[in-house]
Each structure stands twice: as C-alpha cells, then as structure tokens.
Amino acid sequence: MNDHPRSPTTKHRILLALMFGWVVSNQARKDDLKDLKRPSVNGWERLDKVYPTLVECEEGLALQADTFEFYLKQRDPDAKRHGKVFLSHDASYLYGHEFSCLPDTVDPRGPKGEGRR
C-alpha cells in the first residue's frame, strides 16, 4: 500500500467511500533481474467501473483477479498467486501485480507534484 505520510488512513478511506464508491485498482511492479540496483518500475491502473459498496468491489476484484491469473498462466506457467498478489518473470524481469479495492476518491499514486503525472 501507499506509505506516503499524507495518504489517507483506513478510517478516512471508509468515510470517503461511504460518500462515493469503490474501484478495483492494480499496482504493477517490474524489477530488472540483470541489474538489481536499478529502481523498480511501478504504476497504478484503475481497472473497472465504480462499485457502490466494498463488498461489490471485492466481488469484482475476485473476478478480475481470476481472469488475470488465467491469462498470466498462459504466458508464464510458473507464475504464482498469493491472494490478490501475482508474481511472474521472464528472462529479464520479475513482475508483480497487486489488486486492491480503493475508494474512488483516493489516488494511490499520492498527491500531485511529487513526481506524479
């Protein structure tokens, strides 16, 4: 999750979500296996519609995670799933994907102006 000091607490996320909705997001990470000192490449992607409740968002997340696993295993039969987190690799990179339900008012990339576009 986002460890930024200004990121909303769980209590704030719940309060915001009660007023708005929930979205399924995917955080992707790519690490260079040939140069482990090179910084990871990270990115967030909003995957789906806005769900009115956390329960509905979690149901949508489960469906998307199952679909993602199906296609990932076709590309990399050694890929591993740990709940909502997926790990795979090729000859050059290690890939990680984590699915989350977040309030649609929260941008997991953090506040603008800190390297975010």
Image (cartoon, rainbow, N blue to C red):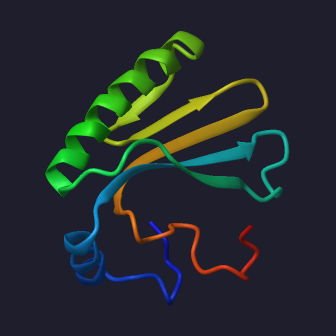
- Foreground pick, 64 / 74: 64
- Foreground pick, 74 / 20: 20
Identified at 53% across, 82% down, the residue is 4
Determine the residue located farthest toward the bottom in the rendered image. Answer: 5
Identified at 34% across, 51% down, the residue is 50
With 51 as the anchor, is 93 left or right in this view? right
Asked if residue 96 is positioned above or below residue 81 in the image, the reply reads below
Identified at 50% across, 89% down, the residue is 5
Q: Position of residue 61 (x, y in %)?
A: 31, 40
Q: Position of residue 107 (x, y in %)?
A: 51, 69
Identified at 51% across, 35% down, the residue is 87
Q: Please state, as top left, top right, bottom left or bottom right, where the N terminus lies in the image.
A: bottom left
Location of residue 33 (image quadrant):
top right
- Foreground pick, 60 / 20: 20
Q: Position of residue 112 (x, y in %)?
A: 67, 79
Asked if residue 92 is positioned above or below residue 115 in the image, the reply reads above
With 6 as the anchor, is 82 left or right in this view? left
Asked if residue 47 is positioned above or below residue 69 in the image, the reply reads below
Q: Please state, as top left, top right, bottom left or bottom right, where the C terminus lies in the image.
A: bottom right
Q: Position of residue 51 (x, y in %)?
A: 26, 50
